[in-house]
Image (tube, grey):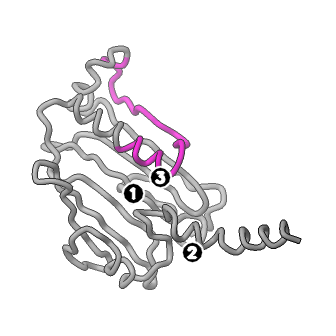
């Protein structure tokens, strides 16, 4: 009898733990309202534009500013993005290290990634890791790491777009809710097998 009682408690509290756990993006779960995001987001509110809320965050005075964007469809959260603003670094290898730190942080939140890709345009520096920063700066290397779980796809990316490095990650609800699977980072994504037809 005691076992059945404990099993029932686990079954009924698991969804609550999910909602109170890591959530789908920065602790939020898909489907929350704009007022929920505005109330509980810890970064400073920046603007509301075309159905999206923007927040700014700067962890310290010496660190780079981050822009956080939440997108809503029919008043419900379905996509979000977190990116460094005006990110320029004299040492391009330090940029790669910061990306690795961000990926490790996301692994702590979402687990092991489904894919961790080095996308090469020109493989001149492929066999020379100490020069990968140079390849990044010249546009020959792009990093991309993805996670998929439940209804969520998370994509982290790093590349150079003059005059700044683009270091960001985005999360999107896919598979339910009638959303078309497109990447928050502006790049096409493969459509998951369980995604609805557009």
Q: CA distance from mark 3 to mark 1?
A: 13 Å
Q: Position of residue 98 (x, y in %)?
A: 28, 38
Mark 1 is surrounded, within 10 Å at the Cα level, by few (under 14), some (14 to 19) or many (20 or more) other residues, namely many
Q: Secondary structure at mark 1?
A: strand
> Which quadrant is the C terminus positioned in?
bottom right
Q: Residue furthest right?
A: 1
Q: What residue is rendered at 50% in x and 65% in y? A: 23
Q: Residue at x 34, y 39 (%)?
A: 101
Which residue does the numbered mark 1 point to in the structure image? Answer: 170
Could you give the CA–CA distance between mark 2 and mark 3, rounded to whole angstroms? 23 Å
Tag nearer the camera, 3 or 1: 3
Magenta span: 102-126
Pinpoint residue 151: horizontal percent, then vertical percent. Answer: 58, 63
- Residue beneath disc 2: 177
Q: Locate residue 10: give its quadrant.
A: bottom right
- Element type at mark 2: loop
Q: Nearer the viewer, residue 156 or 119?
A: 156
Query: Could you tell me how far apart the alpha carbons at marks 2 and 1 are, in whole angstroms?
Result: 18 Å
Element under disc 3: helix
Q: Earlier in the sequence, mark 2 or mark 3?
A: 3
Q: Position of residue 29 (x, y in %)?
A: 49, 70
Label 3 sits on residue? 109
Is residue 113 found left or right of 163 in the rendered image?
Answer: right
**Which comes before the other along the chain, label 3 or label 1?**
3
**Circles 2 and 3: CB atoms closer than 8 Å:** no
């Amino acid at each position: 009898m005691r076992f059945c009682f404990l099993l029932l408690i686990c079954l009924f509290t698991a969804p609550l733990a999910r909602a109170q756990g890591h959530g789908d993006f920065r602790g939020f779960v898909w489907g929350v309202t704009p007022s929920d995001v505005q109330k509980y987001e810890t970064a400073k509110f920046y603007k509301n534009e075309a159905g999206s809320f923007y927040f700014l965050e700067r962890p310290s005075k010496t660190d780079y500013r981050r822009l956080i964007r939440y997108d809503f469809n029919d008043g419900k959260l379905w996509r979000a993005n977190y990116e460094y603003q005006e990110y320029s670094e004299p040492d391009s290898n330090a940029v790669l290290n910061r990306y690795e730190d961000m990926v490790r942080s996301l692994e702590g939140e979402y687990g092991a990634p489904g894919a961790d890709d080095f996308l090469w345009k020109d493989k001149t520096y492929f066999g020379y890791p100490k020069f990968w920063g140079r390849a990044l700066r010249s546009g020959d290397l792009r990093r991309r790491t993805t996670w998929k779980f439940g209804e969520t796809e998370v994509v982290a990316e790093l590349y150079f777009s003059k005059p700044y490095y683009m270091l960001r990650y985005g999360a999107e609800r896919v598979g339910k809710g009638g959303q078309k699977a497109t990447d928050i980072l502006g790049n096409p994504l493969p459509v998951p097998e369980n995604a609805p037809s557009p």
